[in-house]
Image (tube, rainbow, N blue to C red):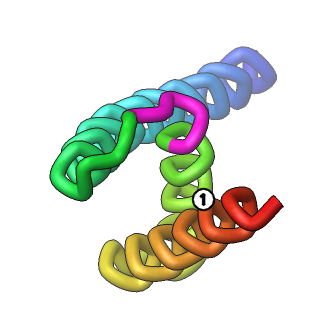
């Protein structure tokens, strides 16, 4: 019986984390898309997904929206500049 209760509590925790990640990712993807379009860039789903994965990981570590956003925007910009030189 205790095992069932323990399993259900873990299951609920991971379900909540998955839902939170999905909501954060949806907002992030929309934000990246808008910023790329405002910068007159061609929208890339791959770039958006990489940026949002970075954002989510950084946000979970720092709990700071602004710090995560700043770091990941800079990383994305550096990656794009590096790829253009090749």
| Residue under pointer 1 | 54
Measuring 33% from the left and 73% from the top, which residue is drawn there? 65
Residue 60 image position (x, y, % from top left)? 54, 65
| Horizontal arrangement in the rendering, residue 37 relative to residue 4 (left or right) | left
User: Which quarter of the figure is the N terminus placed in?
Assistant: top right
Residue 33 image position (x, y, % from top left)? 29, 40
Along the line of sight, the residue nearer the viewer: 66 or 3: 66
Residue 30 image position (x, y, % from top left)? 25, 37
| Horizontal arrangement in the rendering, residue 38 relative to residue 50 (left or right) | left
Q: Is residue 46 magenta?
A: yes
- Most distant residue in the front direction: 85
Main secondary structure found in the magenta portion: helix
Along the line of sight, the residue nearer the viewer: 81 or 17: 81
Along the line of sight, the residue nearer the viewer: 74 or 9: 74
Position of residue 66 relative to residue 36, above or below, is below
User: Which quarter of the figure is the C terminus placed in?
Assistant: bottom right
Along the line of sight, the residue nearer the viewer: 24 or 28: 28
Residue 12 image position (x, y, % from top left)? 52, 27
Measuring 61% from the left and 46% from the top, which residue is drawn there? 50
Magenta residues, start to end: 43-47
């Amino acid at each position: 019986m205790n095992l069932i209760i323990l399993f259900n509590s873990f299951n609920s925790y991971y379900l909540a984390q998955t839902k939170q990640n999905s909501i954060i990712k949806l907002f992030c993807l929309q934000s990246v898309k808008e910023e790329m379009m405002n910068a007159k860039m061609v929208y890339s789903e791959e770039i958006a997904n990489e940026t949002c994965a970075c954002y989510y990981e950084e946000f979970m570590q720092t709990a700071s929206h602004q710090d995560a956003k700043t770091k990941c925007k800079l990383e994305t910009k550096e990656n794009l500049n590096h790829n253009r030189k090749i």
